[in-house]
Amino acid sequence: MAGTEHEEVEETLKRIEAHKGVIGTIIIDAEGIPIRTTLDNSTTVLYARLLRRLTMNARSIVRDIDPQNDLTFLRIRSKKHEILVAPENDYLLIVIQNPCE
Amino acid sequence: MPPKKPKKSSAGSKGKDKKIQSPAAHDWELSNQDHPEDIFPMVLTSATQELFDCVADEDVTGESPYKLLEKDDIIQDIKTRAAVSDFSPVKQIVLDYPEDELLLVYDRDFTYGQSFYLVLTPDAKDRILNPPKPETPEVFEKEVVKTPEPKPWISFGSDKEIDEEAFKESREKLLYKFSRVRRKFGVPVCFSDRNTADYLECASYQDSRFSIKQMQRDCGMQAVPRLQSSSAQTQWKFQKNIFTQYTPRELSVEEKENILQLESLKTFCNSVTPRVLQALQQEGIMNVFFDDWKALGTATEDGDWAGKVSEGLMLYQAFTDQKYTKDKKICSVNWHPTIYGVIAVALTAKKEDQLNESAVRASFILFYTFSDPSNPQLLLECPDDIFAFEFCPSDPNIIVGGCINGQVVLWDISAHVTGLQGTQPGKKVSVNTDTCDFHQDLDDNKENKTPIVRYCAVSALDSSHKAPITDVQWLPATFEVTRTGLPVENMYNVSTQVVTCSPDCTIMFWDVRVSNLLSHSASERRQIMDQKTPYSVPDTFKHLDRTWKPLFRVSLPKIDTSGEYAPLKFNMEHYTCNANENGDSSKVIPDYSQLILPSAKTLKALEDVNTKLYIGTEDGEIIYIDWKLGKDDSGRLQSAKPLHCFSIHHWLVNTVQRSPFFKDIILTAGSWNFAIWKEGVMDGPILLSASSEQVCTVGCWSLSRPAVFFIGKEDGSIEVWNLLEKTNEPVQVHSHVTNAKITCIKPWAASSKQHFLAVTDDLGMVRVFEIPKTLYVPSRSESLNVKKYFELEEDRLKDLLRREELWEKQKETEGLKKRTEPDKPVTSLVENEEANVKEYNDYLMLEENVLKGMGLWRAPADTQDT
């Protein structure tokens, strides 16, 4: 039973990872410790630390403007990649994608 | 001890204690000697030395210099040898000597002037042999160990000095006491008169003894260091040693497993996944962050919306000079490559005047500057009208020009460059007057007379062109050519070679350096030596004057027929060599008069130089030819046949110019149209304009935008073409810029904000236009777009040609078909007929069978069954 739940999570993540251009995914828990990742350890830790801070900041901005609002998605476009951050329920899902063009 | 007396010995008072006895006993010549009186220095010959056993350094040495000699021996020696004996001077003394033995001392150091000395008195002998022992030597040694004790002070004479300086009373002080008698105290005073003459006056007078200026004063000084003690103390408020070392927190594998199985994580994943997938998909479709608005605008719109931005060419200045440009047209114009605002124009007489010319009028190249539009600043004197001229790219003071009579002319304006530079806008013009007066005659007192520079060198008349030179170009500084046209490495990194072309069907290569004198004949050599350059002509090119011959000639035989092409303009590819980039920092322009033509064998050949030229001819053809001379059948050097020839223009070609951005795109203009070619595409121009109503007289590329070029027309209008906007007509037409035919257009980028276009015409006027920003600032990725456009055009051309071939072939096959058509219908009809008949027979058979089967068969007439 526990295995099947684990499986569901895996399966969902596999769908994301199989998408075109995805370089890696990271799941971070409430304290910023990576739970599951497809990248190497040092990169994971770096992304986790930095993006958690940014997401906290972004969320506080949104809620400062309107306390009933909340951050749903954060997208950072850089020259080389695009970083997608989805916060929800104390967890954080980070996806790094290579743009197609 | 006898008291000391001053000694007369010069070298004798070292060490030994000399005591001189009273000279009463020895009052003969010894008293004036410079040695003590009781010894006698003497020389002993080696014979005497052997006789008395006192050979120097053997019997007597420095350590034991004493030798006792028997008195009798000496007397004997004196008797036997008489005057020759060494002892003869002391004969008397020896005879008087009281004792029997005399002391002979070996004086190694020549203390008394001779190598031996004889001690004359027994006392001295005793003293020398038994020197008084130094008193208490042991005590002296012991004293060194003890601490030094204070010794009584020994006066060395300094107390006298102190006494002299000290101030002492020389006599007792005199004391005079005046007092009134006691009983007169308090008594009233009675004054009475007295005659002053009875008194002796002691008037004060100036005594010179007391007016001496003290010139020197002794002053005592003591330098005392100023001591100052100070201290500093930093306060370490929070004494803390800090260091940080962290590792990221990580969960162990079991913990991770636990979390992964949590319900909350599952919900999280489920809720987050759709969003993420949508975002990923978006990214795959298009770039959400792409700013279309920004990408739409060009670089010019970055903030420059101030006021009106002019679209067209604005007239900046016009230059003309009444005196020199009357009845002349301008054939060539060039901007000075380094000095701002200086244009040089070459004037030629118009065609009608040329034929009527009986007297030779002086021809000039005028230099105009922005600061003075109606007076030229410098004139270059030419032997004849100049059709084309160019500044040397390595040294802008050297100018080469091609004459109407086929000669090539060189000028050196280094003496007058300061005059040109001095007339910059904003600077005083007074500099000009100084240089003006320098070369003038005495009766020319007009102010600001323009200096005239005579040419330094012209080519030899018989080896020049036979027709006017229509185009002159310098070879770039990156390579040079040998006598056979082979490109080799350029050692000096300066442009030293010139290429000229002329309608006499040749292209000549010239070299401005000193060539090997051996190649000249004797008469020429004499001519070179005898030549005296006229005053005020720089002798940079003295070695070339009137004897200059070209390096080699390229002739242009026609491809298909006999005869030759008559070139008017040509263009070669600029070769850039990467290896020369490190030499740029030391940009020393060598003196041109010192450069020597190197032998071809010493230079390294460059393989990748493009040696092909594009040439425009009198008849409107564009030729592509290699300038290297090859060997023909007879072994002589011969020019190669042109590789390609195209008759695109129908009349004179007046422009062949390479694009400054792409080294394989060439613009040619002539007659009623212009064309753009790509080097390597041998099938034709990639772009050919439609024929216009006016003759295109000149074309030139813009220096900053790859897609823009300018065409000048015969009616005095200028067309601005932009290949990225419209390709079938010009973007701008500035009609009637002048009233006469436009002869030359040259653009120039003076600074990043100012771009000029110089336009010259048939009337001798030069107009300088300012190119608006829209025309000189390239649009975003314009170079790339233009390149793509040219490639498209090339493909289109190739495609067109391919299709043409295909159509040709089809036409041929069509033609064949038509010829064979009359036979075909006949055969086909016959075949059809046969087929029909066969079918009909089969049908009859079938009908027969069926009817027979049904029993209704009736035998028909026996006509068809065959």
Image (spheres, coloured by chain):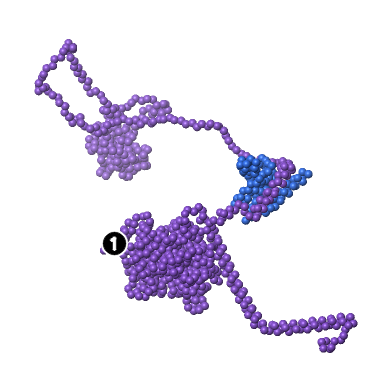
Chain colours: A blue, B purple
Give x and y (percent) for residue B77: 29, 41
Which of the 4 image quarters holds residue B189? top left
Which residue is situated farthest in the top direction here?
B183
Res B858 → quadrant: bottom right
In this view, B513 is above or below B290: below
Image position, residue A80 (x, y; %): 61, 52
SS state under label 1: loop
Q: What residue does disc 1 label?
A: B446
Query: Dividing the image into 4 quarters, which one contains the N terminus of chain B?
Result: top left
**Quarter that holds the C terminus of chain B:** bottom right
Q: Is residue B541 visible?
A: no
Q: Residue furthest bottom?
A: B862
Q: Nearer the viewer, residue B466 or B49?
A: B466
Foreground pick, B524 / B40: B524
Tell me: B452 left or right of B285: left
Left or right: where B603 falls relative to B197: right
Taking the spot 60% from the left edge, 53% from the top edge, the residue there is B290
* Chain where mark 1 sits: B
At horizontal 25% and vertical 44% (from top left) the residue drawn is B83
